[in-house]
Image (cartoon, helix red, strand yellow):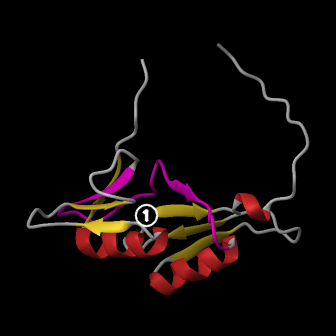
Amino acid sequence: MTIQIHHLTFDCTDARKLGEFWSALTGWHLFYDEDPEVIVAPSFPSTETSFLFIPVPEAKSAKNRMHIDIKPEDTTRDELVERALSLGATVYGDHRKEDGSGFVALRDPEGNEFCVERGEHEMAARGPMTIGLTI
């Protein structure tokens, strides 16, 4: 059996505002109508994973048990971090290292954690890798 992840769903207090943040950060489109739910996706309808924002009455009260790791395709990690900050994100852990590796942990405007990693184009070429698999 296989699956496809359809949405990553965010409970939030202001679905439109949070959707606008993630749309601006990802470069994806913002889709909404009279329904209070908002979708951020590369296209609509989309067969790709998208973000779904659902308004709920209660505020976020604890650390997320799951978070999103994102990486840039056409800019650098540091430029993407600056973009996120200019849109209203805050840094809660800077794990960048002198050699350029590492990541930055941020919170979106409603406090949801996400990390910004380096893009593939920022990483040094890798040699052969050994990966252990279990069946």
Residue 64 lies, in percent from the top left, at: 45, 54
Residue at the spot x=72%, y=21% of the render?
133
Which quarter of the image is occupied by the C terminus? top right
Q: Is residue 69 left or right of residue 132?
A: left
In the image, 91 versus 99, the foreground residue is 99
Residue 32 lies, in percent from the top left, at: 19, 66
Q: Is residue 14 in view? A: no
Residue 114 lies, in percent from the top left, at: 52, 62
Residue at the spot x=86%, y=58% of the render?
124
Residue 103 sits in which quadrant? bottom right
Magenta-drawn segment: 50-75
Residue picked out by circle 1: 112
Residue 47 sits in which quadrant? top left
Residue at the spot x=40%, y=29% of the render?
3
- Which structural element holds mark 1? loop
Count of numbered tags: 1
Height in image: 44 above or below 100? above
Q: Residue furthest left?
A: 34
Q: Residue furthest right?
A: 127
Residue 57 sits in which quadrant? bottom left
Q: Residue furthest bottom?
A: 86
- Whether 127 is among the magenta residues is no
Q: Is residue 52 in view? A: yes
* Other residues around mark 1 within 10 Å, as few (<14) / some (14–19) / many (≥20): some
In the image, 25 versus 108, the foreground residue is 25
Q: Amino acid at mark 1?
A: Asn
